[in-house]
Image (spheres, rainbow, N blue to C red):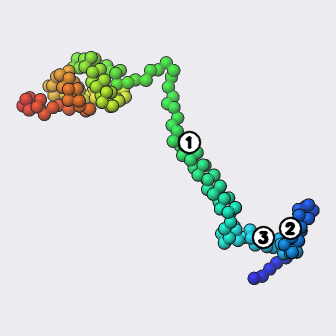
């Protein structure tokens, strides 16, 4: 192995302390510094594992994990929707009613779904209402259908098979 001479500066107090450490091991200052540098080289290259090196690596990994968790939580949090203070959030109850289905039966249907753990927002309410309108256009009584679906504890809108058979 080729060796080179290296010189560097240090404070007098540090030089005196390192010189006393070297003397306690019966080494010269330069020999003691070379041994220290070899130990550090082995530690950093992974050849020599000590508890201190393991602890420092665990600390680094822990810090990286904490950083990743913070980034994950930051990405996960959703910004609140921007709304005007006076504007009320529309629900499935807020619908414009036509002749084929009265408000009382519509509220019965929404309450039934709510008790069945099916919660509709305004858009979904519009979709349900449109489905009732389609069924009305097919010639079925929507108010009777709502009562029948509630009896059957239905969570979706459908025309019972018996009703379809009777219509034919």
What residue is disc 2 on?
21
Q: For the residues carrying marks 3 and 2, which lies nearer the camera in this image?
A: 2
Q: Judge whether residue 15 can be spotted in this image.
A: no
How far is disc 3 from disc 2 in space, using C-alphas? 15 Å
**x%, y% of residue 86?**
49, 18
Q: Quadrant of residue 133?
A: top left
| In the rendered image, the vertical position of residue 66 relative to residue 18, given as above or below | above
Marks 3 and 1, how far apart in space? 42 Å
Residue in front for this viewpoint, 86 or 77: 77
Q: Earlier in the sequence, mark 2 or mark 1?
A: 2
First in sequence: mark 3 vs mark 2 = 2
Task: Identify the mark at residue 168; answer none if there is no mark.
Answer: none
Crowdedness near tag 3: few (<14), some (14–19) or many (≥20) residues, C-alpha within 10 Å: few
Which of the 4 image quadrants contains residue 2?
bottom right
To which residue does mark 1 refer? 74
- Can you see residue 94? yes
Q: Quadrant of the C terminus?
A: top left
Residue pictured at 63% horizontal, 52% vertical: 63
């Amino acid at each position: 192995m080729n060796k080179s001479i290296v010189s560097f500066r240090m404070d007098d107090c540090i030089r005196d302390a390192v010189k006393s450490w070297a003397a306690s091991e019966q080494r010269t200052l330069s020999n003691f510094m070379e041994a220290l540098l070899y130990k550090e080289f082995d530690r950093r290259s992974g050849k020599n594992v000590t508890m201190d090196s393991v602890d420092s690596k665990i600390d680094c990994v822990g810090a990286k994990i904490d950083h990743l968790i913070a980034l994950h939580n930051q990405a996960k949090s959703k910004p609140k929707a921007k709304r005007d203070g006076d504007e009320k959030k529309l629900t499935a109850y807020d619908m414009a009613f036509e002749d084929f289905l009265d408000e009382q039966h519509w509220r019965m249907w929404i309450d039934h779904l709510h008790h069945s753990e099916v919660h509709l927002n305004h858009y979904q309410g519009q979709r349900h209402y449109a489905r009732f309108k389609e069924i009305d256009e097919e010639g079925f009584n929507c108010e009777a259908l709502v009562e029948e679906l509630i009896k059957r504890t239905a969570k979706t809108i459908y025309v019972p098979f018996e009703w379809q058979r009777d219509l034919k």
